[in-house]
Image (cartoon, rainbow, N blue to C red):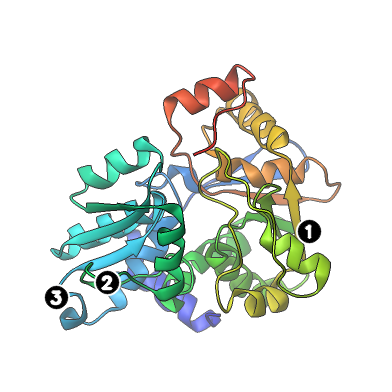
Amino acid sequence: MPSLDEIRAARERIGGDVVRTPLASYDERILLKLECLQPVGSFKLRGALSAVRAAAPEAIADGVVTASAGNMAQGVAWAARESGVPARVIAPAGAPRAKLDRVEALGAEVVPVPHEEWWQAMVERGREGVPGLFVHPVADEAVMAGNGTIGLELAEDAPDFDAVVVPWGGGGLTTGIASALKALRPEVRVVAVEPETAAPLAAAFAAGRPSEIEFRPSWIDGAGGRALLPGMWERARELVDEAVAVPLAEVEQAVRLLAVRAKVVAEGAGALALAAALGRHDRCVCVVSGGNVDADVLARVLRGEPPAPV
């Protein structure tokens, strides 16, 4: 996991090209860290810029590659365009069209593959026939350091709080934030949240070790997974205090509450933290990780209709 010095160096690298996102009050107990307000609609720009700018020019001469359902793809595409190199994105077939349209608008080439091959590209850190420097969306020190700049901002901007609640997809966001907060506010509990249909971290915490789970696809594409990525259990065990899984219906309700009460548009992963925080009694900061949601999915959720899995 990144050190505090590495996170501070990442903040210098990314500079003013990311938004120092505001903290909005949901109620007297819950604050919202609005990463959905980043230029690409999610926190992923922090890690992508940190990693691409940390790479030597010769390392990215053939371009950059990532494996992403959409948000990291946008971050890497943005960073590659700024650096003047090609970007290629290995994406799972069925990824939200709203995200892929923006990836292509940023100039990246999308390489669609079955979900299993997409997952394998993350495990193997690339895919044969797709050239370029692979920027891992999760297990990359520079990416995690970039994500950790959120933790720096929370330590500097947030009043006293008891817990930070973070959606867990692969774990790079939680690891980055926790690395900063454990150094600066060690009393704060780090709570990782997954959808109950894809919750390998919660299962690992319950069993004390990584365990096989029954994975069921859902409409939440940016969080949860089939299994823990290599090396992430060791990081989580050191940095995460709790791992919880929430029912899809509670995530849908959190999307509606964010829209109606906070006037915030959140994708499923972005609403996970609030869904978990609503069942707690301590002072929480919820990381609203992204707002890139297909219009038809959002419309169904707002009408109270469960969206179809992707």
Q: Residues within 10 Å of mark 1 (few under 14, many from 20)?
A: some
Q: Position of residue 139 (x, y in %)?
A: 48, 73
C-alpha separation, residue under disc 1 versus residue under disc 3: 45 Å
Q: Position of residue 150 (x, y in %)?
A: 53, 61
Q: Which residue is mark 1?
A: 162
Q: Residues within 10 Å of mark 2 (few under 14, many from 20)?
A: few
- Mark with earlier residue (2, 1): 2
Q: Position of residue 42 (x, y in %)?
A: 44, 48
Q: Position of residue 114 (x, y in %)?
A: 40, 52
Q: Which residue is mark 2?
A: 128
Please tell me which residue is depicted at 51% across the width and 32% down the height of the picture: 265
In the rendered structure, the answer to whether residue 310 lies left or right of residue 62 reads: right
Give the structural element (helix, strand or loop) at label 1: loop
Residue 241 image-quadrant placement? bottom right
Give the structural element (helix, strand or loop) at label 2: loop
C-alpha separation, residue under disc 2 versus residue under disc 1: 45 Å
Q: Pick the quarter of the image with the N terminus.
A: bottom right
Tell us which disc is closer to us: 2 or 3.
Answer: 2
As shown in the figure, which amino acid type bears the numbered disc 3? Answer: Ala
Residue 248 image-quadrant placement? top right
Q: Which residue is mark 3?
A: 61
Please tell me which residue is depicted at 78% across the width and 70% down the height of the picture: 187
Tell us which disc is closer to us: 1 or 3.
Answer: 3
As shown in the figure, which amino acid type bears the numbered disc 1? Answer: Asp
Furthest toward the top, the residue is 303
- Along the viewing direction, whichever of 272 and 100 lies nearer the viewer: 100
- Mark with earlier residue (1, 3): 3
Please tell me which residue is depicted at 58% across the width and 27% down the height of the picture: 259
**Is there any visible trace of residue 15 in the rendered image?**
no
In the image, residue 165 sits, relative to residue 241, either above or below, namely above
